Image: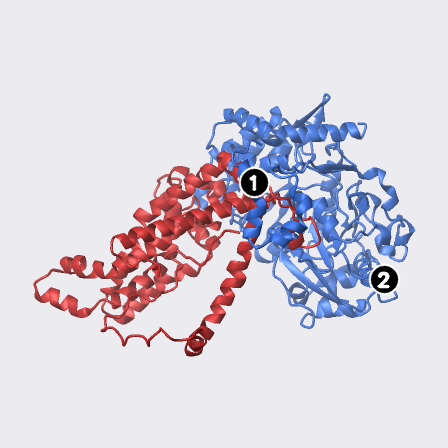
Chain colours: A red, B blue
Amino acid sequence: MTGKTGVAGPAQARPLPVQATPEPQAAPPPARRGMTLRAKFHRDRALLLMTVPAVLLLTVFHYLPLLGNVVAFMDYDQWAGDSAVEAIVNSPFIGFTNFAELFEDSQFWDALRNTLTLTAFQLVFFFPLPIALAILLNSVLSPRLRGFIQTVVYLPHFFSWVLVVTFFVQMLGGAGLLATVLRDNGMEPWNIMGNPDTFILLVSTQGLWKDVGWGTIIFLAALTAIDQSLYEAAASDGATRWRRLWHVTLPGLRPVVVLLLILQLGNALTVGFEQFYLQREAVGRQAAEVLDTYVYYLGLATQDYGVGTAAGLFKAVIGLFLILIANRLARRFGEEGVFVRS
Amino acid sequence: MDNPLAGAAANRRSFLSLMGLGAIAVAGGGTLAGCGEKAANEGTAQQVDQLSAVLPKYQPLELVQPDIKGVSPVANGFTKYPASLVDAITEKPGRGSTITTMTPYWGQVPAGPGQNAYLDAINAELGAVVTPGIQDGNTYADKLNAILPARDIPDVLCIPSWEIPKIPNFSEAVKALFEDLSDHLAGDKVKPYAMLANLPTVAWSNAIWNQRLMAVPWPTDGPYPWALFYRKDITDVLGAAVPKTAEELYQFGKKVTSPDKGVWAFNNILAMVEMIFRVPGAKEGWRYKDGKVEFKYETAEFKAALEFMARLYKEGLVHPEVVASKGADAKLLFSSGKIVMVQDGVGSWLGVQAEQQKVTQGFNMQPVPYFAADGGQPLVHGSGDPIFYTFVKKGLPKEKIAEILGVLNFAAAPLGTKEFELIEYGVEGKHFTRGEGGWPQGTDLQAKEKADQFRFLAGTAPTIKYDARVPTYVNDLINWENAAVGFLEKDPWSGIKIEMPAGYVKVKQPTEDKITDIARGRRPLSDLDVVLKEWRDGGGEEGRTFLAKALSDAGR
């Protein structure tokens, strides 16, 4: 439905290979010229074999469903014909009518605005926090203590959103721990869970609590890849802790930070569904409608798949452009970026 | 629609060939002609009360005399267990086929055939392997919205009636997915299925789509969708009287709410508040008054109800967890005494009472008798429409359909038969023991293995029967239900099966969001006029025109 193609935000990203080890360049690859395709296949057969499962997975769950995007240009009637494929064949093409319908809907723009505001807010105020936490954790010397803290902060990542929201309700809600303590001390608890004006802060905090630990994994790996001798050299030159952080640690992390930032931008229009669906009535549609809930209520709940798919496609195309732009900018500033055009 | 991008549509053929779908474009060529516009679903209205030809012939089967009479449409009550049981179905309906089913359940999902003695015992009697696929009843609509368009359906599918309006173009889905049962059950053809012939005709007439009989109905045993339940054990201690007017309801809320003790009065009771203020409820909120078709949002009654609900929220009488998250479980909060009065389905009564009295000493849950805001004659929403519909997958071989209908017939066997006892309670000695008056009493194994796998496939002719866990239940329920029958709202569209136009369905959720904003105090009550205008322009007017036409077409 959403044209999300295997690009995940920093929170869900798999630990990517972080940085080429600073060893001297390995022996140059065997001469390429003169090798037949067959020979190349033969040489790389083990590697190719290993990529087969991933390719299959991508094909079946990402590339084949992509074909369904054609519905965005149709007046799709899922009951036309005897199967889903026949329904697609039998449904008439209507050009960009679905998109026109989408762009004429003021609710769509509300949802888009909410989504963008949230992304921008989280990018500025919350994206740096996993980095800070990783640096902090990295400075904990006792491996046992570090492992313990890591486990504790990773754990919420595996909770479902229902659980996370319930946890916040139990802590900060009107019948929760905080409210009870305040009442016991003769104070009137204030409304945290149901205030549309501070909702952005609430959902970001929930997201942070859930995923900040998970987000540190990649940064921790990057930190271990920084050459220790740089620290030693800096220290012997009289650099303070802060100086070392500023001149050694952060530059060492920069490629990873840029990489994750680019991936995050690709997901700019995806802020999640359940979290907003669950809390929608508490703060109202105005505050809690994001693109994913909009697609659900418009496309799925009323089975207007054409418009729903159009919204999903729109999201994916914007995401793609953001990635391309960010990647180009990153490369212009001398970074590796996500990919290189060969 | 004014479409600034219409020019691009002309290139659709090149677009298709670009996608490598040229062959498909040719195949679908005929349909490409009328391009650029969407065909809007304009809704359907059919007068099912004039389609008697496809209905099965009613053949009543009276095995047991009722002990308490229900006033129609309330079912009769049975307090004495029949002394001897009839073996109603002597021939095994099955021929050894595997039959997959899907039913809702609100609780733990038990093991499947081979690991479940309850299932295996029934399957042995049936001579078939019924393999249940149980889905969470709370999210059943989501599941349906996934499997129906994918056409990935089991042989037998149970769909609760309240989920059907959530599925747009349902009659089209029915046509594409389910077997037409008219040829199997109409008129005298129902004869081999004596238990199905025992189901009331009014229930069958609701199972008609596109002028054909498409499902087996699960007849309702009581017409009321909602009730207010209160914790009598708590209110007796607090000295809070059961409310009889809106003002008393408010005072009740004030009296029992005590945040210091973690106790609040209500969950979201808007549906009941609407009823109390006599807001129309037919076809989800329509009425025909003084020659005009009106929706509830347009009435003064609704405005008063909304104002009242907003007051409950404003004064903090609704439990904060219910306010904060959709994930909150009002039933659980009510059971644990954190909510004193809850709006819930009538069907929840027996289960909550039976389970919670084991945990809480003296737990006593009672329904509030229906009342009106001003203390006058109440208006009670409700209908005699079936609770579930059971559909059979289209295109199965004729023998298998007969086999499936035989299974449904078995499940529909009424109280007084051996089949009923097996379906309802399981095997004696394993799943139940004989309690007082011969009534079966469930064992732990029954609780573990039975999830109404068969009961939700086919209902019996309506009965309300004694339950050993809550001996007073039959009397309490029927007396309470009988008292309200006279106040039931008349549905001007009764006997007409309505499927609302798509434009109207689309405006529903956005409008409900705005109404929620007003109820929760995020927008002033005066905004209701704005909301109303947006609703009318957005599709509400289309709904009115449609319903008015349905009435005049029916000559009413």
Residue B469: give x, y in percent of width and height: 68, 57
Placement of the C terminus of chain B among the 4 image quadrants: top right
Name which residue type carries label 2. Leu
- In this rendered view, identify the residue nearer to me: B88 or B364: B88
Mark 1 vs mark 2, foreground winner is 1
Q: Quadrant of residue B438?
A: bottom right
For this orientation, the residue located farthest to the top is B290
Say left or right for B430 vs A161. right
Q: Which residue is mark 2?
A: B85
Q: Is residue B342 left or right of residue A318?
A: right
CA gap, disc 1 and disc 2: 70 Å
Horizontal and vertical percent position of residue A268? 40, 48
Taking the spot 15% from the left edge, 57% from the top edge, the residue there is A242
Residue B366 falls in which quadrant of the image?
top right
**Callout 1: few (<14), some (14-19), or many (20+) C-alpha neighbours within 10 Å?**
some
Q: Is residue A277 visible?
A: no
Q: Which residue is farthest front? A: A34
The chain under label 1 reads B
Report which residue position mark 1 lands on: B9
Query: In this view of the protein, can residue A32 be seen by the observer?
Result: yes
Image spot of residue B403 (x, y percent)? 82, 63
> Which quarter of the rendering shows the N terminus of chain B?
top right
Query: In the rendered view, does B151 fall on the left or right side of B96?
Result: left
